[in-house]
Amino acid sequence: MQTTSGKTGEAGRGSAAPELRLLPSVARVLECSAFRRLAGRWGASLCTEILREEIARLREQVLAGHLRGGSLRRSVAGPSLARRVDGVIAALSAPAPRVVINATGIVVHTNLGRSVLSDAAARRVAEAATSYLDLEYDLNRGRRGSRLDHLEPLMARLFPGSSFVVVNNNAAAIMLTLRALARRKEVIVSRGELVEIGGSFRVPDILAASGARLKEVGTTNRTRLADYEGALSSKSGVLLKVHTSNFRVVGFTGDVSVGRLSQLARDRSIPLVVDWGSGDLVDLGPLGIHDELPVRRLLDDGADIVTFSGDKLLGGPQAGFVVGTPHLIARLRRDPLARVCRVDRLLIGALRETLASYVRGTAFDDVPTLSMLRLSARAIGRRAGRVRSAVAARTSAGSRLSVIDGVSKSGGGSSPLGERATRLLAVSADGDDAGPLERALRQGDPPVVARVHEGRLLLDLRTVLESQEAVLIERLVEVLGGARSASRGITRTGS
Ligand SMILES: *Cc1c(COP(=O)(O)O)cnc(C)c1O
C-alpha cells in the first residue's frame, strides 16, 4: 500500500519531497464517496488497480518537477482522481474497433476492414454467435460431419467439377497450398510477380515459410514461356502465378497467360497454382473493371488451383479460398496446416449467405461491395447533392461546398488502374488548408474518414452506407457549423 511519509528517504529527491506528501494513500482515496460509487460501477479490484497506477503516475510527475502547487492539489482531490480512474476504465470498456464512416470511396479498404457483409450474412453471424450449431455434426446420421460441408453445395454450383478448402485468409490459403504440394521442392515464379501486397504479405516470405524453395524466372518486366520451361526439373513442385494486385509495370512488358502456362504444366505433370488475390466470382467488366478475371475462367483456362480472399471483391468475411482439382485439394485437406488455419463458426454462416447470393444471381443487390462498385456517378452525385443541401441549410458553409467529378478506387489490391467515375462532395477550406477539417471529421464521433486533395476536403459517397448519411450530415454540420464547433472537434484529439 502506498504511503506518503516524507521521511522514508524521499528527502534525498530534493525539492520534490514536500510535494510528495500531498499524494494521498490508496486506502484513503478508496474511502471517499466518489470512489465508492465508482467501485460499485466497475468493481473494486479494477478501480483499486487503476487508482494505484494513477497515484504512481502523479508521483512520477511530481518527481520530474512537472506537477506542483495548486495543480497538484487539484489532481489529488478524491473526485478528480475518481474522474481519471473512471475515464481509464471507460476507455478500456469502450467498443473497438469503432464504427467509422468511410468517405474515401475506396470500396475494399483494407485499413477500414475491407468488405461490409450483406444483411443476410450479418444476421447469420449474430445467430451463429449465440447458439449451438450443427457445425460439425451430421444431423441425419447422428455422427461427426465436416464444417466445410455447409459450403459444399454452393461451391459445387459455382465451380462445377472442382473441390475446395476454406481457411482464414488468402495468405494461409497460399501457404497451405505450397506446403501440401511443394514442401522441400521448388516453386517456379516470375520475377515480375514477387510482390508485396501490404499488411506484410510478401510472396517470397510466405513461400519460404511454407517450406518450399523459390525458383525465380524471367525479369521484372518480361517473363516468357521459355523461362518457365528452362527452370523445370525433377526438383519442381509447383508453377505459381501471382496476380500483381496493387501495382502495374507499364511499357515493355510481358507475362505468360494462365492458358499457356497450364499447357506446360500439364505436359510436365506439375500443378499450376494461381494466387488470384481479389477473387471475383462475376464478370466486373460492365463496371469498368477489366483486369479482374472471374476465378471460374482461370479454372477453365487450365489452372489446377486458384486461391483468393473472401473479403475483397467477393464481398464476404475474411477468409481464404482454395479451389481446384479434387485430388490436389484432398492433399490440402489432409495437411495439418488446414486444421491450424480452419475457419471459425461465425464465418461459415456468413460465407454461406454470401455465396448463396452469387448462386441466386443477386450478388449485385445483396453484397454491399458489389452494389457500391455498381453505383453510377450520377447516383452518387445525387446523394452528394442531398448532403450538400442539408448542410447548407443548417450552416453558413454552403458556398464552400460543391459537387465535382472524381474517381473511386476498388482497393484491396485489385485493379490498380481500374477506377470508377464518381461525383465528390468537395469542401474548400480557409487558406486552402483542409488538414484541420479532415482531422476534426476523423477524430469526432463517429469518425469520418475522407481525403484531402489540393487544399480541399473530398468526400465520396460511394462508400458511405445509406444508413450513415444522416449521421454524416450531423458531423459536417458540427465541423462546418462555425469556428466554435470546429475547434471543439479539434481539441478533442488531445484527450
Ligand atoms: C490480398 C492478396 C493476398 C493476401 O490475401 P489475404 O486474404 O489478405 O491474406 C495475397 N495475394 C494477392 C495477390 C492478394 O491480392
Image: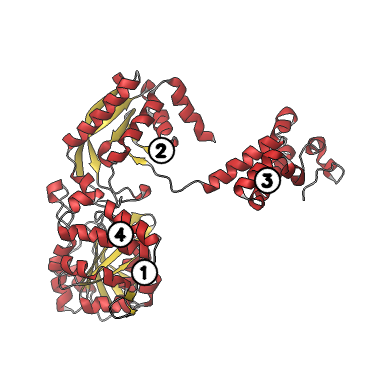
> In the rendering, at what x and y percent does residue 131 appear?
39, 63
On screen, 220 above or below 136? above
Image quadrant of residue 335?
Answer: bottom left
Which image quadrant: the C terminus? top right
Q: Amino acid at mark 3?
A: Leu
SS at mark 3 in the image: helix
Nearest to N terminus: mark 4 or mark 2: 4
Q: Residues within 10 Å of mark 4 (few under 14, many from 20)?
A: many
Nearest to N terminus: mark 2 or mark 3: 3
On screen, 490 above or below 124? above
> In the rendering, at what x and y percent does residue 201 appear?
36, 59
Q: CA distance from mark 2 to mark 1?
A: 33 Å
SS at mark 1 in the image: loop
**Closest to the observer: 236 or 143?**
143
Residue assigned mark 3: 51
**Closest to the observer: 456 or 97?**
97
> In the rendering, at what x and y percent does residue 392 appear?
30, 22
SS at mark 4 in the image: helix
Question: What residue is rendered at 32% in x and 51% in y?
Answer: 114
Cβ atoms under marks 2 and 3 closer than 8 Å: no
Q: Amino acid at mark 1?
A: Arg
Residue assigned mark 4: 350
Q: Amino acid at mark 2?
A: Pro
Q: Residues within 10 Å of mark 1 (few under 14, many from 20)?
A: some
> In the rendering, at what x and y percent does residue 239 appear?
23, 71
Image quadrant of residue 270?
Answer: bottom left
On screen, 209 above or below 294? below
